[in-house]
Amino acid sequence: MTVTILYFAALRERVGVSHEQVALPPGAPTVASLVDQLRSRDARWTEAFAPGKTWRVSVNQHMADTATPIKPGDEVAFFPPVTGG
Amino acid sequence: MPTVRVQQADFDTGRELETLTRGRVDVGAVASFVGLVRDANDGHAIRGMTLEHYPGMTEKALEAIVAEAHGRWDLVDTLVIHRVGALAPGERIVLVGVASAHRGEAFAACEFIMDYLKTRAPFWKREDTPEGSRWVDARASDDAAAGRWD
């Protein structure tokens, strides 16, 4: 059971990938548990999601937060605060 | 029928705004905003910029912002066009057009849509300066501007 993860802009450059499939964390996964799983990979990921680093998250193309639950097949995206217009 | 478009190509501001009133006689006011690429930012010369977006979500976010505007004000029609890709100083980035019976709604909704777009629509600017390129940081002043509408 996997989720698709997308990364945009500066966050994409920091982690070095634009998208990937990731196995869901066990239990009742949320954005927070997914981020914990990513942080534990290596220094790049720890750094990208370090406390104090500002990032935003969407689940299935709707703005979300760390408490948002995730389920198999979801599209989760991580990105910096937006700067359009 | 509100229009939302994300595109690389430039747009003709006059022709786009005309679509808001064509064939209608109930529009008394059209307010618009055009955003352009400047040649300087925070004291750095800007040679150009590249706009990245999140295809799919960007359109949804813009449609949600426009729907929110229609819920808050009595609007006849709205238009949002936002460009992506490489843009040079002087080029148009974004057009917001709002048609309503009276100017008050049109002015307010146009400003609201831009304030929300700047803080909620997934676009990211990367500026090219003589020292190299850099991602533009989000501004607290944009959050404050959007917060006025809460």
Image (cartoon, rainbow, N blue to C red):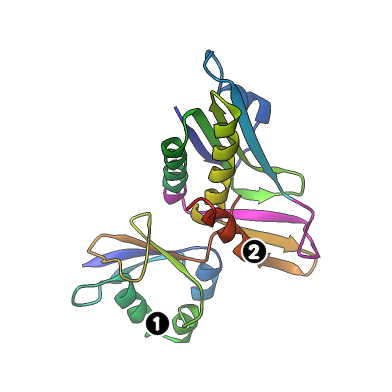
Q: Residue at label 2?
A: B136
Identify the residue at image location x=54%, y=13%.
B25
Examine the image and state in which quarter residue B99 appears: top right
B142 to the left or right of B127: left
Label at residue B133: none
Examine the rendering and report whether any part of residue B139 can be seen: no
Q: Is residue B47 magenta?
A: yes
Residue labelled with disc 1:
A39
Q: Is residue A6 left or right of residue A28?
A: right
Q: Looking at the image, do the residues carrying marks 1 and 2 touch, with CB atoms under 8 Å apart? A: no
Give the spatial CA distance, label 1 vs label 2: 25 Å
Frontmost residue, B73 versus A20:
B73
Residue at image position (54%, 43%) is: B113
Residue A54 at what x, y percent from top left? 51, 73
Q: Residues within 10 Å of mark 1 (few under 14, many from 20)?
A: some
Quarter of the image for the N terminus of chain B: give it: top left
* B97 in relation to B39, above or below: above
Q: Are marks 1 and 2 on the same chain?
A: no
Q: Which residues are magenta?
A: B38-58
Q: Is residue B32 above or below residue A47?
A: above
Protein chain holding label 1: A
